[in-house]
Image: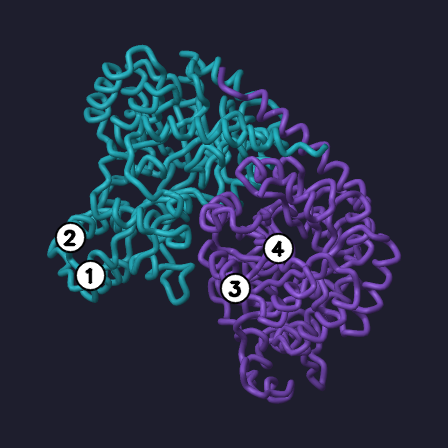
Chain colours: A purple, B cyan
Amino acid sequence: MTSQALCEQYGIDFPLFAFSHCRDVVAAVTNAGGFGVLGATAYTPEQLDRELTWIDEAVGDKPYGVDLIVPAKFEGKGEKLSGTDLAGRIPQAYRDLVDDLLRSHDIEPEPERRLGGASLSGNTGRELLDVALTHPVKLIANALGVPPDYMIEAGKERGIPVAALVGAKEHAVKQVAAGVDLIVAQGTEAGGHCGEVSTLVVVPEVLDAVDGAVPVLAAGGIVTGRQMAGMVAIGAAGAWTGSVWLTTEEAETAPHTVAKMLAASSRDTVRSAGRTGKPSRQLVSEWTDAWLPHSGGHQPLPLPLQSMLCEPVIRRIDVLAAQGHDGAQALATYFVGQGVGLMNKVKPAREVVREFIEDYLAAADRLSNSLPG
Amino acid sequence: MTSQALCEQYGIDFPLFAFSHCRDVVAAVTNAGGFGVLGATAYTPEQLDRELTWIDEAVGDKPYGVDLIVPAKFEGKGEKLSGTDLAGRIPQAYRDLVDDLLRSHDIEPEPERRLGGASLSGNTGRELLDVALTHPVKLIANALGVPPDYMIEAGKERGIPVAALVGAKEHAVKQVAAGVDLIVAQGTEAGGHCGEVSTLVVVPEVLDAVDGAVPVLAAGGIVTGRQMAGMVAIGAAGAWTGSVWLTTEEAETAPHTVAKMLAASSRDTVRSAGRTGKPSRQLVSEWTDAWLPHSGGHQPLPLPLQSMLCEPVIRRIDVLAAQGHDGAQALATYFVGQGVGLMNKVKPAREVVREFIEDYLAAADRLSNSLPG
């Protein structure tokens, strides 16, 4: 599908999809002619309802979507397990390891260990979807494997396209066979969960494999309009972005994290499973150094055990880092892609969209003027 | 610099640079309107002279270049060391480790260990350059750090541009300051030595950092004209390619290696220091599994000790693999980038150039037609 056809189908002016956990970013991008997608995983159903109600008012009848992460595979899938049952599968050695890491950074572990929710275990995915469907969402996105049947069926019934993020062409083929309507081909340079293949390679591979059955968006490392234009030249219908919105004025990123990102080069991220149990790209820190594949690091636990163990600790680290605690600042990490090296200024989200469009047009001119005699 | 200006300066029709160890590929690409570059590191001065004489006859006055690898840093640099002195720095434990790896794959280690030459130590670089300068080369390229002064001076004296491969913007800035005339910004998806940052990110980063001082070619994962067009849209003056020529009719790649590459997906490569001591991308195999960052792998020796230890063994493995030896086939590896996933057919090199041009033109049309109303 061409990018023009995609814009027509999705009711947008410019095929720039913006993933953000922040409703203000979602609304700003949608209102600027792009397509905002709210990352909904961290919300309770009640919170999600509130956020979407706010967005509905902010965007009128302009389109936006929600992104749920319902992984296809996870520890305890198919078993009737409570959070407590799952927690029992976190070995004491790992609890000790995290405590030691904290102590070595002058942070006293909490006497009663708090564990994160098993939200990635998919039980809450359905509830969040039900809430989203009471709002006029125009896209349901999913990562970490083929979406569950109930998600694909709900989309088909209501005429809402379902999108899936993939990091390899084999996964794209499976997703299309399962009924997905839009493929986001995401390279290893992406922030958050990602595969091993670069955007420049995985996008043409997925395009070839999908062979026009559904449109393909390019993702991973894209923080400028020129990169997006390059991907459209290759055949993508548009771009899916995430990191670039983290340093916008609207984003709720903590100031010390924004400062870290503005200063970071593209070599300051690492693909590590030390946060969720699946490889995800984030700022390199003494936390990521503690886990494989860092030399001498530990083998992370499987999803969702690693995030149950680590997320509450990482959130505590963030709070301490914001207060200027040295050890916490050395440990603090944040999901972001290699494009962070090109993110050097805080801007309003609307301004980012405007710059994307200008930069895209200049890139199209450049390529057009390059044509061999 | 625009790609048109680059073509004019280098006397070519299409800004496609082809790195190959095979003179036939170099000549075929140059004769098809691109720019062939002979990888010269593996040759003795006499051999290189023969190869370049052959190319001179094959291309007439069309332009071609040579690529030397003179690393800026290596074990023993600045010391007066013979090959035997360097060999003495290879610990017995590493010799044993390689022997054990061979035995576990039903290959008897050779009773007298042969070590590879320390060609990467830079002593032969100057001799090879002197030979190259007796031929009408139109580009001298170097990888692994800032080229030695004698290389930059020789280029300036004779009006021959000197190119440098870089994997990070900081390196590009250093190279330009040192007097390099052409920067090849190479992503982590590239075959052979490579950095950590993807092509899609490192190319715009390097373009911004270099700020027009010298032209920038994009490299890493580029095996099609559409990818090249994407990079020109971003601002690269052209593309530097390597892997795609390995499965051409002219290449001297062994048939079992060609078969492995045609069958490989983009996920069948790994960035490993287990061959030369510096991270390089190659086909994943039980050889690469034996070294870090593979979980449980060993820490490789520094450059050039690792390649002195390993290259003769890997060459022996290649010979056995070609004979159908199972253990050798499991161990065999080869430098190639993630673009291998898009290399699915053996073709003449001239045909590859023709397809690049067609695919490039189609991509430019696609981007041009995508422009928002």
* Residue occupied by mark 4: A191
* Residue occupied by mark 2: B320
Instruction: Report whether mark 1 lies on the same chain as mark 4.
Output: no
Instruction: Report whether mark 2 lies on the same chain as mark 4.
Output: no
Camera-nearest residue between A50 and B103:
A50
Tag 1 secondary structure: helix
Q: CA distance from mark 3 to mark 1?
A: 39 Å
Decide which of tag 4 and tag 3 comes sooner along the chain.
Answer: 3
Q: Is residue B196 visible?
A: no
Mark 2 nearby-residue class (10 Å; few <14, some 14–19, many ≥20)? some
* Residue occupied by mark 1: B327
Q: CA distance from mark 1 to mark 4?
A: 38 Å
Q: Is residue B110 visible?
A: yes
User: Disc 1, disc 4: CB below 8 Å?
Assistant: no
Residue B295 in the image: state x and y as whole percent. 41, 65
Q: Amino acid at mark 2?
A: Leu
Q: CA distance from mark 3 to mark 2?
A: 44 Å
Tag 4 secondary structure: loop
Q: Residue at x 24, y 31 (%)?
A: B250
Looking at the image, residue B159 lies above or below residue A210: above
User: Disc 4, disc 3: CB below 8 Å?
Assistant: no
Q: Residue at x 69, y 43 (%)?
A: A7
User: Disc 3, disc 1: CB below 8 Å?
Assistant: no
Q: CA distance from mark 4 to mark 3?
A: 26 Å
Residue B316 in the image: state x and y as whole percent. 17, 50
Chain identifier of the residue bearing label 3 in the image: A
* Residue occupied by mark 3: A178
